[in-house]
Image (cartoon, helix red, strand yellow):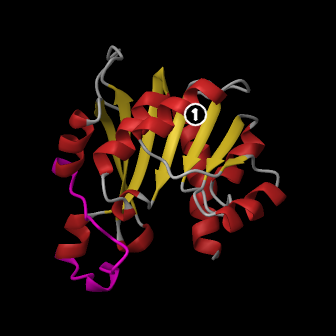
Amino acid sequence: SETIAAHNQRYAATVTEVLALRAEDLVVEVASNDGSLISCFVPHGVRVLGVEPARNIAKIAEARGIPTEVVFFSGAEGARLKAVHGPAAAVIGNNVLAHVGDPVDFLTGAAAWLADDGRAIVEVPYLEEMLTRLEYDTIYHEHFSYFSVTALLTIAERAGLRVVRVDRVPVHGGSIRTWFAPARSVPDHAPE
């Protein structure tokens, strides 16, 4: 849709600007589907990589020029992929965390792949919006979890990450984009 395409372009521009990404930086999208979001980083001149478990969908991304690893992402895969592709400036999981049975393992993989100054960036439908706006149509069988900021703080700590920024975004009835830094990194300023 035009709405999601515009959202993806703003998303890529925001990440590029906030992280001051350079040509040598690697931006990864986990559960990259056909590459619609990660392809928005290409005009910003950074290296991109998709991670997608569905081979048929990954082929669509690859045909669009998006290199894609066909694997189911996990803590172990994050470490392996870092060894293959190098550390990531950003690991993005856009509307995937709710679909994951073990969100701590997922974020552990992101933490393992990040450069010391990198960010894992996860966008999820926001539990508060769902409850206050009675958005029950956002509840469906593919979602294992619904997230509040408190829940994300808890799983971040368990995964070796810390929350450094939370943005509210209007898509999907109200979502939050949470920025995580590796717990091993030294905070250089107040949360963003």
Nearest to the observer: residue 85 or residue 114? 85
**Farthest bottom residue?**
137
Q: Give me the residue at 33% from left, 13% from top.
A: 186
Of the residues shown, which amino acid type is indicated by label 1?
Answer: Leu
Nearest to the observer: residue 99 or residue 23? 99
Q: Which residues are magenta?
A: 132-150
Q: Position of residue 75 (x, y in %)?
A: 40, 38
In the image, taking residue 158 as reference, residue 93 lies left or right, namely: right
Q: Quadrant of residue 101?
A: bottom left
Q: Position of residue 110 (x, y in %)?
A: 44, 37
- The majority secondary structure of the magenta stretch comes to loop
User: For residue 135: magenta?
Assistant: yes
The quadrant the C terminus occupies is top left
Q: Give me the residue at 29% from left, 79% from top.
A: 139
User: For residue 159: magenta?
Assistant: no
The answer to whether residue 19 of the structure is visible from this angle is no
Q: Give me the residue at 64% from left, 32% from top.
A: 26
The number of discs equals 1
Q: Is residue 117 above or below residue 176?
A: above
Q: Position of residue 143 (x, y in %)?
A: 33, 71
Q: Position of residue 39 (x, y in %)?
A: 71, 52
Q: Quadrant of residue 136?
A: bottom left
